[in-house]
Image (spheres, helix red, strand yellow):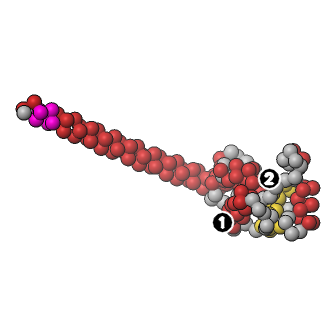
Amino acid sequence: MVIKVFLASSSGSTAIKKKQQDVVGFLEALKLDYTQLDIACNEENRMWMRQNVPEEKKPTNGIPLPPQIFNEESYCGDYDTFFDAKEDNSVYAFLGLPPPPGSKEAAQADKEHIVQNGTHAAENPDDSAQAEEVEEEEEQEEEDLQSEEEEELRQLEEEEEAEAQEGEEDDLEETQEEEAE
């Protein structure tokens, strides 16, 4: 399966350019096979993209803007849906691809008992154990991070309290000196 990303190589919009770069950069980081199809200098690509974006996904003017993402002939979405999938760690599902073993998305799929590769997650103890291990590691990392944040907050509060006490002592000394004069 090849992911198709419809782009405009000569777009005058910096927002569109940034969105296109974000999609392409993320697909490259995941090392996924994808093809860039330019709609700016290839009328065939432009017409194919416009005809294959579902009506309910088209903007009010009826002309979808790049980037538009497809898995072969199947529409995946535009930049906004891609961004949401990225934020939810569900890019592989968004692209219609199985998540790689050990990824957050695979662990989430195992956790939700989604059928993968013809076997139910509960039927494959190795996958379930690996998913549990990944989940436990993530929970431990989150707890460690929270503990570190709480410790930093406690230290900051102690420092502020110490500074406040020093300020009060300085004020008291000044008051005593003024009274002594």
Instruction: Name the residue type under label 2.
Output: Gly
- Residue that badge 1 annotates: 29
Extreme-left residue of the structure = 180
- Indicate the position of residue 104 as horizontal and vertical percent values: 63, 54
* Residue nearest the viewer, comparing 27 with 50: 50
Any part of residue 25 in sight: yes
Q: Is residue 99 above or below residue 28?
A: above
Give the spatial CA distance, label 2 vs label 1. 19 Å
Marks 2 and 1 in Cβ contact (< 8 Å)? no
Q: Give x and y (percent) for residue 167.
A: 23, 39
- At a point 70% along the width and 46% down the height, the residue shown is 113
Provide residue 107's location: percent of width, then percent of height: 64, 52
User: Where the C terminus falls, by quadrant?
Assistant: top left
Q: Which residues are magenta?
A: 173-178
Q: Nearer the viewer, residue 124 or 171?
A: 171
Front-most of residues 15 and 32: 15
Residue placed most toward the observer, 28 or 45: 45
* N-terminal-most mark, 2 or 1: 1
Residue 3 visible to an observer of this rendering: no
Find residue 16 and report its image quarter. bottom right
Circle 2 SS class:
strand
Q: Is residue 175 magenta?
A: yes
Amino acid marked by disc 1: Ala
Most frequent secondary structure within the magenta stretch: helix
Circle 2 packing at 10 Å, graded few (<14), some (14-19), many (20+), is many
Q: How many marks?
A: 2
> Is the residue 4 above or below the residue 129 in the image?
below
Q: Looking at the picture, how far across and down is residue 121, in whole percent? A: 70, 50
The image quarter in which residue 92 lies: bottom right
Quarter assignment of residue 180: top left
Q: Find disc 2 in the rendering and name its residue.
A: 77
Q: Is 135 placed above or below 21 here?
A: above
